Image (tube, grey):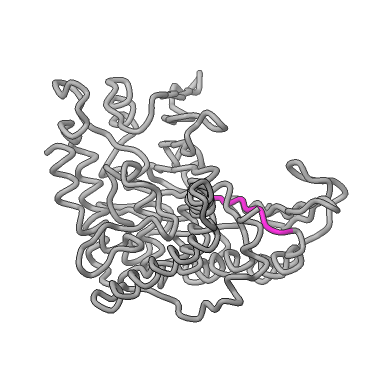
Amino acid sequence: MNVLDVKAALAAAVWCCAPGADEAGGEASSAAGRPPAEDTSCGVGGVLPPIGNTGGKLTGDEVRAGHDWGNWTFPAERRDEVRALVTGVLGPAEERDRGANTYKASASWESGCLLAWTEGRREAWLSMNGDSCDMIAPGAKLGFFKQLLALGVKCTRLDIRLDVSRALVSMDDVHAAAEAGNVVGFKRYDPRRSRDMYSGELDEDQALFGSRGKNGGGTYYRVYDKGLESDGEIDCIRFEAELSGDRADAWFATICGATDTAAMLKWFGTIAVSSIGFFDKSGAHQHRDRFAILGWWEKLVHLVGESVKLATSRVKPSLEGTVRWACATWPRALARIANAVDCQGMNGAAELLRFVEDLVDAGERKLQSRPAPLLDQGLSVGVLRAERFSPMLR
């Protein structure tokens, strides 16, 4: 099976989650902040939580998806509201006598979550570590995310994990693929294995892909033996995507478009698996669509894809995510059009308004003939002009 086969087999599973996908099978829109198609060419849908409770050990063909870290910035005037929201799930915070990150003042929760700010600075910062993320029950997490988004946050880091049973994959499989160059999506591979000199047993086993920071492309990926890292508390192989910058914000807006917890977990699975791929490149002459998927990766991809098909609810595109996308992508294009009209001796602003009105009319005709699975109709003109959207236009 090659990349094209994988795409064909799993397209329906991914499509049912795609923001902006309409019933007639048109192009999936990036309106809710979904990264472009090339970022998910090896992707599949998310996963449902396993049936039953096996504690920290995954058995058989089990996979579990989760959210492991999150950083957000937000308008400083919303600091009290953000603090109250987090306090509602983590308990009270305490003021600290020092700052955090690049901010001069901060407060912290017992679980390690941080809120930081500087008086006079326009934005503040929230950082939720893994322990804090785990304190929010899956059933409450989507509501928490939606409330954060409503407060005007911008996600700057988002870590998503997929815990996989050892019956499906081993770290030897991952290292062998990386050493053979059979990894899609990254140019840099950093193996980290260490042993106890007395027992000879491994005490660390990781495969790191990509780079953090401005040269990292927005995704840093770790595959590691969680059993070693947690001293046996969580016995599995963990695949973890660390998203940053615009990519983190785009995926966060997309997750917030989920209608329920199962749909949210679908997106977690989509992110974890679509951010990397393991394919046999030999004989393909670097033609990506000719790569044959490795057997263990095919099994994992298939399992995650099958989990998607068990959930029939569609993810409705987030209207607020659509507005955020419009604020980020429209201004320059519209300004170019207006300037071009001005250069022709006409009133650019007036002609631009007529142009936009024509686009809206055309869109309404399409919606009447082919209703899209949108929308939260409660978004009023007042909300569009609300202060929480204005920073996006600056």
Relative image position of residue 167 (x, y in whole percent): 26, 44
> Does residue 164 appear left or right of residue 228 in this picture?
left
> Residue at image x 56%, y 47%?
157
Image location (x, y in percent) of residue 295? 18, 37
Horizontal relation, residue 95 to residue 55: left or right: right
Name the dominant secondary structure of the magenta segment.
Answer: strand
Viewer-proximal residue, 68 or 53?
68
Q: Position of residue 230 (x, y in %)?
A: 51, 43
Percent position of residue 161, x then y: 43, 48
Residue 32 seen in the figure: yes
Location of residue 24 (image quadrant): bottom left
Q: Number of callouts in the render? A: 0
Residue sitting farthest toward the right: 97
Q: Which residues are magenta?
A: 69-75
The image shows residue 347, relative to residue 239, as above or below, that is below
The residue drawn where x is 15% and y is 51% is: 9
